[in-house]
Amino acid sequence: MAREQLSDVRYGWNGFADRQDLATALAGEIADRLTSAIAKRGTALLAVSGGTTPAKLFAALSTTPIDWDKVTVTLVDERFVPPSSPRSNAGLVAANLLQNKAAAARFVPLYHEAASIEDAAATDSEALKSLPWPLDVVILGMGGDGHTASFFPDAGNLEELLDPVSQRIVLPVHAPSGGEPRLTLSMARIVAAGFIAIHIEGEDKRAAFNGATGPGAKKPIRRVLEAAPRPIEVFWAP
Ligand SMILES: O=C1O[C@H](COP(=O)(O)O)[C@@H](O)[C@H](O)[C@H]1O
């Protein structure tokens, strides 16, 4: 593990020889953080991303001994699709993370039926106020375009999503590159987490991360790295 510093963006770089090693190590790190949160406050709050990357991590985490009945799991972001859709992040979490030992966790989804994505986001923002904030752990992914969560570069309300003092918990996203309308945690909630990891795999993602965080770049992932009060840990494998 080597620490890199690029321009004014600080992060830790944790490189692994293969994806299974990464999944095992990151699951261990998450378990330590959740266990320590439970020891301190009797409960723990974890937010995870969806997409194609986290299935192995979820499988490793699901068999890790943690007091899962004291853990609340929610999503960093979600497509406006029901859990039965293959594009549902809640569906991915149910099938891969909320299994084995982790079946005892409480899951709070972002999607529910609503007249509009704006209504769904407003209802979520109210409903999620009762969660034990701040997040203890948040696992972010990153797209090749430098988006993380649903902070797409072409989102009409990108500045609202990235407002570091936003009081909103969940916001709606309309972005042509994102496909369906989305629901996302605000950046303010994400960067307040006790531990933030970015989980990316493949040479293309490493190149995209370097491009998106390089000098002069202002991609959403860089905005998150800049806003975080402590360095984010990047977990990468080829
Ligand atoms: O759209 C999304 O994409 C990112 C990255 O997904 P991946 O398939 O490239 O791993 C993901 O972090 C996010 O949760 C998801 O909604």
Image (spheres, rainbow, N blue to C red):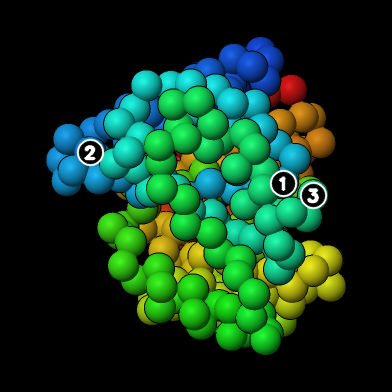
Q: Dot 3: what SS? A: loop
Q: Which residue is drawn at 47% across and 57% down?
A: 108
Residue 148 shows in the view = no
Q: Which of 119 and 196 is in front in this view?
A: 119
Q: Is residue 42 left or right of residue 107?
A: left
Q: Is residue 65 left or right of residue 232?
A: left
Q: Which residue is drawn at 71% across and 82% down?
A: 156
Q: Where is residue 110 in the image (x, y as percent from the top left)?
A: 56, 64
Q: Name the residue under label 2.
A: 38
Q: Name the residue under label 1.
A: 51
Disc 1 residue crowd, few under 14, some 14–19, many 20+, Cα 10 Å: some
Give how far apart the Cα atoms at labels 2 and 3 are. 33 Å
Q: Mark 3 points at which residue?
A: 86
**Residue 235 sits in quarter:** top right
Q: Position of residue 83 (x, y in %)?
A: 68, 56
Q: What residue type is labelled 2?
A: Ile
Q: Which amino acid does label 1 sit on?
A: Gly
Q: Where is residue 36 in the image (x, y as percent from the top left)?
A: 23, 33
